[in-house]
Image: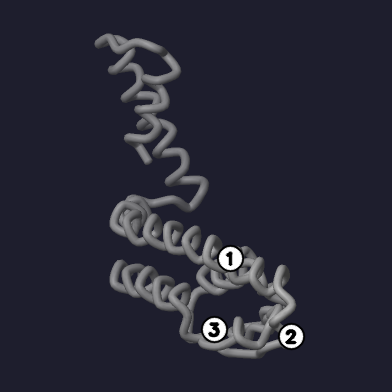
Amino acid sequence: MFLLFLAIWIIYNGQLTIEILLFGLVISAAAYLFICKFLGYSVKKDLFFMKSAGLILDYIFVLIIEIIKANFVAMKYLTTNRYELEPVIVTFHTDLQSNVARVILANSITLTPGTITVSLVGDEYQVHCLDKELAQGMDSSIFVKKLRRIEGLEAGNK
């Protein structure tokens, strides 16, 4: 975060001189100490975000691919008469530990066309699916596997 503050300082100044760099180091250090003291931020969190950045980017990439694939499936269902849609509400549990990971999973399901997270209570999800085929394997989807890896990294960081 300190380096991000310093980079923003240099970009906003539009040039790099010794005076701007030294003043930027002081301002960035002060801002970093402020967020550490008053906003609950820490060097430990900084290191975790740096370690998990690759996994988070991988998750975002997989989410985009799954959204694209689900768009084609939903278009196929809606544009052809061969399929008789059977909407269903599925209930499943997950072993994700953090509330953040659970909410990210719920949002990922909702962002994927053909599925909407209706309810999330504890570790129990209720998801409405456009067709019963879309409901298969939801509790062990690639989203859950990727979020488990991110949580495993976080647990190892504590």
Residue on which the image places disc 1: 72
Q: How is the image coloured?
A: one colour
Disc 3 from disc 1: Cα separation: 18 Å
> Which one is nearer the viewer's eye here, 54 or 65?
65
Which of the numbered marks, if any, corresponds to residue 138?
3
Q: Secondary structure at mark 2?
A: loop
Tag in front: 3 or 2 = 2
Which of the numbered marks, if any, corresponds to residue 84?
2
Image coordinates of residue 5 in percent, x first then y, are 40, 32
Disc 2 from disc 1: Cα separation: 17 Å
Disc 3 marks a residue whose amino acid type is Met
For the point 47% across and 42% down, the residue is 35
Q: Is 153 placed above or below 94 here?
A: above
For the point 55% across and 63% down, the residue is 67
Image coordinates of residue 119 in percent, x first then y, are 71, 79
For the point 42% across and 57% down, the residue is 61
Of the two numbered discs 3 and 1 on the same chain, state the one appearing first in sequence: 1
Neighbour class for label 1 at 10 Å: few (<14), some, many (≥20)? few
Disc 2 marks a residue whose amino acid type is Glu
Q: Secondary structure at mark 1?
A: helix
Q: Residue furthest left?
A: 18
Q: Is 22 placed above or below 17 here?
A: below
Q: Quadrant of residue 18?
A: top left
How many numbered marks are there?
A: 3
Q: Quadrant of residue 74?
A: bottom right
For the point 50% across and 58% down, the residue is 64
Residue 128 makes an appearance in the image:
no
Q: Secondary structure at mark 3?
A: helix
